[in-house]
Image (tube, rainbow, N blue to C red):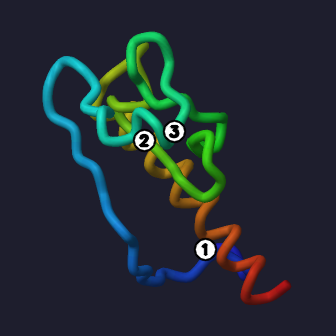
Amino acid sequence: MRKDGLKPFQIAVGGVLIRVGVEPNTELFRDQLQLDERNYISVNSQQEASVPFIFAIGDVANPLAPTISGATGSGATAAKVIASRLNAKTHG
């Protein structure tokens, strides 16, 4: 690990949405987050949704490649972004 690498930590979250099925289960967010024409959550390259500090990963945010490896990769991206922002807040 790098000298200044991120350290493991725990964080309380308000909720986690787990999706199983062939259509995105995003009705809950319809009036809160930007969805595409097929009701997938729109995210940027950091997996952040249209509302700051809200992240979406996996099948619900990836209509082109809904795979376990895709979900794992987008989860790793979101985790690094979140950890980086938290680290900047505590050291900035």
Left or right: 21 in relation to 91: left
- Residue that mark 2 sits on: 57
Say above or below: 31 vs 9. above
Compared across the picture, whether 67 is left or right of 84 comes to: left
Q: Residue at x 28, y 26 (%)?
A: 24
Give neighbour class at mark 2: few <14, some 14-19, many 20+ (Cα, 10 Å).
Answer: many
Taking the spot 57% from the left edge, 42% from the top edge, the residue there is 49
Tell me which label, 1 or 3, sits earlier in the chain: 1
Q: Horizontal and vertical percent for residue 8?
A: 48, 81
User: Please, what is the three-letter code of the amino acid marked with disc 1?
Assistant: Met
Give SS at disc 1. loop
- The mark lying in front, picked from 3 and 2, is 3
Which one is nearer the viewer's eye here, 39 or 85? Answer: 39
Badge 3 marks a residue whose secondary structure is: loop
Residue 35, given in percent of the width and then of the height, sits at 49, 26
| Residue with the mark numbered 1 | 1
Q: How many marks?
A: 3
Q: Measured from the top left, where is residue 52 in percent x and y? A: 65, 53
The image shows residue 18, relative to residue 11, as above or below, that is above
For marks 1 and 3, give the CA distance.
36 Å
Could you tell me which residue is drawn at 55 percent across and 31 percent down? Answer: 34
Residues at marks 3 and 2, CA–CA distance in whole angstroms: 14 Å
Q: The disc labelled 3 sits on which kind of residue?
A: Leu
* Residue at which label 3 appears: 33
Q: Residues within 10 Å of mark 1 (few under 14, many from 20)?
A: few
Q: CA distance from mark 1 to mark 2?
A: 26 Å
- Are the residues at dot 1 and dot 2 in contact (C-beta closer than 8 Å)? no
